[in-house]
Amino acid sequence: MNDKLAQTNRDLLHQVSVLRTAISSANVATLMKPYVESVLAMCEALHLEALRQLKDLAYRLEGTIPDILEATQRAGNLLDLVNTRFAPPIIRFAQDDCLPLAFINWLHEEHAVTRGKPFAVSDGGFAVYPTPDWPIVYFLPVTRRMTLLLLPFLIHEFGHLLYACHKPELDELVGEFQQRVARVLAPTTVRDRGPATNDEGSQRAVAEAWYPWTQEVFCDAVGLAVGGESYLKAFSHYFRFRSSQEYYLPRRDQLLRRHPVTRIRTTMLVDRARQLGLSGAASEVAEVWLLTARTLGILEDYEGTWVDELFIPLREIIDNMLEESSPVSYSALPESAPLPTINEAWSRFEKNEPDFAAWEKSAIDTYLDNAIG
């Protein structure tokens, strides 16, 4: 066991050395320097840990083996995390990352709880690792790193980070809504304290599903609060024609997803957009979703995971969550923010201007010159 543990720790030292060399030699944007420093600090911690285990193993004391084994396992898991999550955004860095990096930097700097947190971007579907105590990694598709229209989706992902930063308070609010779901959807016999039915367990599963689902609705609300009309347009444009599953899913499939049926999210966004004075854009989105559902022949049926009685309670809970997390409002942003450029991009795109691609490239260059020099 002693020799095998020594082999594992020597391999750890070697892997960390290779990793540090690759990271140190990467040519990344200035905005990523804090992120690189954080990842290199993890590598240094791994290096010291491996040396410590090798030193202890050299004494060949049987009583220390369990502790060394546990420490070696922890170090190996952290190495895997650095290798698979934190190092790739550095190693694969491309100049096209600068647009989302500048956008995310603006988001982070506008909020006190995220200001100064190291972050990076990588390739994939829109997503984020919202870990406040670790470097933050955002994901977005390749062409969306190079264009303007769907950049507001990053605000939704930023919403997950805000949630993580305010988790105890927001979890409590989500729990209140889950209790409301359980009461509203409970079988009548249960509400009347009669015998339990076979539906009770199923309704409990629905209430549990609303834990991640409420978070998604909250992140949409953050997207709208910060991004205004640009987020509403991006959301509708991305989802409206993707699949009939955005409009209807069987109950069993709904309960397997982290997101509620997109039609519910759209309904909540349209309502909130009208509250914010974005009635024109809200009506346009509501109309196209209704027309698409009719064209697909889909009736509004959530198979017991949603009823209209939950609409007002969900709206109120999201209001409270926004008050707790305090995202900046798009109406209070300075002209230097990227949103005016994105809003202009949507206007030009919807008018089908023939020079849109050339204009967009110029607009991105101008924004980046102003944002990062």
Image (tube, helix red, strand yellow):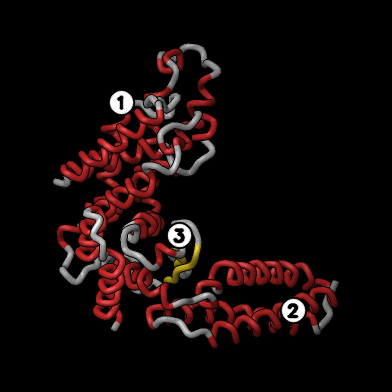
Q: Earlier in the sequence, mark 1 or mark 2?
A: 2
Q: Position of residue 41 (x, y in %)?
A: 53, 80
Q: At 31% across and 66% down in the image, what residue appears? A: 357
Residue 308 placement (x, y as % from top left): 31, 26
In the figure, 199 relative to 342: above or below?
above
Q: Earlier in the sequence, mark 1 or mark 3?
A: 3
Residue at 48% across, 56% down: 125
> Which label belongs to residue 309?
1
Residue 44 at x, y percent in the picture? 58, 82
Distance, label 1 to label 3, CA atoms, is 32 Å
Q: Amino acid at mark 1?
A: Glu
What's the residue at 51%, 22% (across, down)?
A: 200
Q: Which mark is residue 11?
A: 2
The one nearer the camera, 148 or 295, is 295
Q: Is residue 158 above or below residue 134?
A: above
The residue at which mark 3 appears reads as: 128
Label located before the other in sequence (2 or 3):
2
Label 2 element class: helix
Left or right of 75 on screen, residue 41: left
- Residue 27 vs residue 312: left or right? right
Q: Are marks 1 and 2 in contact (CB under 8 Å)?
A: no
**176 with respect to 252 (left or right):** left
Residue neighbourhood size for the residue with mark 3, other residues' Cα within 10 Å, grouped as few (<14), some (14–19), many (≥20): many
Q: Does 331 sit above or below residue 69?
A: above
Residue sitting at x 45%, y 33%: 207
Confirm whether residue 68 shows in the render.
Answer: yes
- Residue contact between numbered discs 2 and 3, judged by CB atoms under 8 Å: no
Identity, as a three-letter code, of the amino acid under mark 2? Asp
Residue 211 shows in the view = no
Mark 1 vs mark 3: give the one in front: 3
Q: CA distance from mark 2 to mark 3?
A: 30 Å
